[in-house]
Every structure is written in structure tokens, then in C-alpha cells.
Image (tube, rainbow, N blue to C red):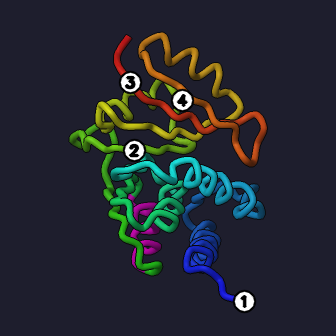
């Protein structure tokens, strides 16, 4: 039985993440045993939701590469940029991109000082509360673009808080791994 190129790359990515995690703390050590069933599965769910989405992709605060590296593996047709301000994490991301022959680019800069990138799609996972995250997204998202924000069980409260300063169209997708979490598909972002 043959294993797909994507499956091989996902396995190699998981192996690299486990190898680097003790030195850099890319994911919480308490969740490392659920790397495939939680972290990677969440990112695969996002890749599935955005399967027919056109345009390039920008992953904010990429950290250990979730969901950015998974998107680069699953959507090699996407021009993909990962932004990570931590030098060590950016080095990890560059190593993964090189070892897995991915077409992604890694920028080691702060999101809030980087010139706007006008991305068609933006993702973020475990980066910041939604009210703060909206400013980052607004800075780098094309006006007709889509933000794909992976949020935990407080996502409803965060959406309510964000609506104090922002208006946007929201389509929540239930998480595949946590019934209380969601992937927020956000479009039409503007200051309230």
C-alpha cells in the first residue's frame, strides 16, 4: 500500500516537531502525546475547510507551524508565508520548510511592524485574544480576503468583545477535535 506524499510529509513534520520541542517549546509538552490527534488534526480540518479557497496564505504567529506548515503540506499550490518573531521558532520553521521541500517563506518579524501584506487568506492559532488579533488581521488582509482563526472554548466571548471595535461577517465552524472550540471564518472586516 502506498502512502501519499502529504502523509509522508505530515509524519516527517511531526517527527521534527517532537525533536525540536524540548529545546524550544513549540507546543505545550503536556499535549505532545496528542500531536497528531489534536494539533495536526485541527490544522487538517482548516485545510479541508479552505480547500477551494483561492489566493495566497499568510500564517500569523506561526510558532511551531500550526496551522501554517500543515497548510503548506496540504496546499502546495498556495503561495504561503509564515510570520514568526521568535528567532528560534523561525529557525525551526525554516528547517522544516527546507527538509520537507515546501514552498513556504518564513519572515522573522513582528506582525504589528511589518508592512501590510494584502493576503487573500490569513490564519492564526493560539496567538492572541480576538480583539487584539483583529488589528493584526486587518493590517495584513486584503479587503476581500478571509481570516481563518482557530479559537478555543472562549471564542463566543472573544467575538462579542471584538465586535465592540470591529464589524465583520462570521461563519463559525465547529472544531473537529474539541466540541467547544471553533475555526472562525471572518470576512468583511472594518472598524466599528
Residue named by callout 1? 1
Q: Earlier in the sequence, mark 3 or mark 2?
A: 2
Q: Earlier in the sequence, mark 3 or mark 1?
A: 1
Range of residues picked out in magenta: 87-98
Q: Earlier in the sequence, mark 2 or mark 4?
A: 2
Q: In the rendering, which numbered label is found on residue 189?
A: 3
- Using the image, determine if residue 173 lies above or below residue 190: below
Seen at 44% across and 48% down, the residue is 53
Can you tell which of label 4 and label 3 is closer to the viewer? 3
Determine whether label 3 and label 1 are within 8 Å by CB. no
Q: CA distance from mark 3 to mark 2?
A: 13 Å
Determine which quarter of the picture holds residue 43. Answer: bottom right
Q: CA distance from mark 4 to mark 3?
A: 16 Å
Q: In the rendering, which numbered label is found on residue 129?
A: 4
Please state, as top left, top right, bottom left or bottom right, where the C terminus lies in the image: top left
Seen at 36% across and 70% down, the residue is 103
Q: Residues within 10 Å of mark 1 (few under 14, many from 20)?
A: few
Q: Residues within 10 Å of mark 4 (few under 14, many from 20)?
A: some
Q: CA distance from mark 4 to mark 1?
A: 44 Å
Amino acid at each position: 500500500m502506498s502512502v501519499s506524499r502529504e502523509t509522508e510529509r505530515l509524519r516527517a513534520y511531526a517527527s521534527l516537531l517532537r525533536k525540536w520541542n524540548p529545546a524550544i517549546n513549540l507546543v505545550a509538552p503536556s499535549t505532545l502525546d496528542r500531536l497528531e490527534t489534536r494539533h495536526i488534526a485541527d490544522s487538517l480540518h482548516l485545510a479541508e475547510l479552505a480547500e477551494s479557497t483561492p489566493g495566497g496564505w499568510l500564517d500569523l504567529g506561526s510558532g511551531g507551524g500550526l496551522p501554517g506548515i500543515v497548510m503548506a503540506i496540504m496546499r502546495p499550490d498556495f503561495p504561503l508565508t509564515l510570520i514568526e518573531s521568535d528567532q528560534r521558532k523561525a529557525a525551526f520553521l525554516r528547517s522544516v520548510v527546507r527538509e520537507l521541500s515546501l514552498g513556504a517563506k518564513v519572515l522573522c518579524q513582528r506582525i504589528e511592524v511589518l508592512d501590510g501584506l494584502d493576503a487573500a487568506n490569513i490564519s492564526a492559532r493560539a496567538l492572541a485574544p480576538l480583539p487584539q488579533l483583529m488589528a493584526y488581521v486587518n493590517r495584513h488582509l486584503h479587503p476581500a480576503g478571509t481570516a481563518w482563526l482557530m479559537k478555543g472554548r472562549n471564542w463566543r466571548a472573544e467575538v462579542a468583545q471584538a465586535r465592540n471595535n470591529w464589524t465583520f461577517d462570521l461563519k463559525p465552524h465547529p472544531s473537529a477535535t474539541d466540541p467547544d472550540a471553533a475555526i472562525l471564518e471572518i470576512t468583511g472586516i472594518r472598524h466599528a
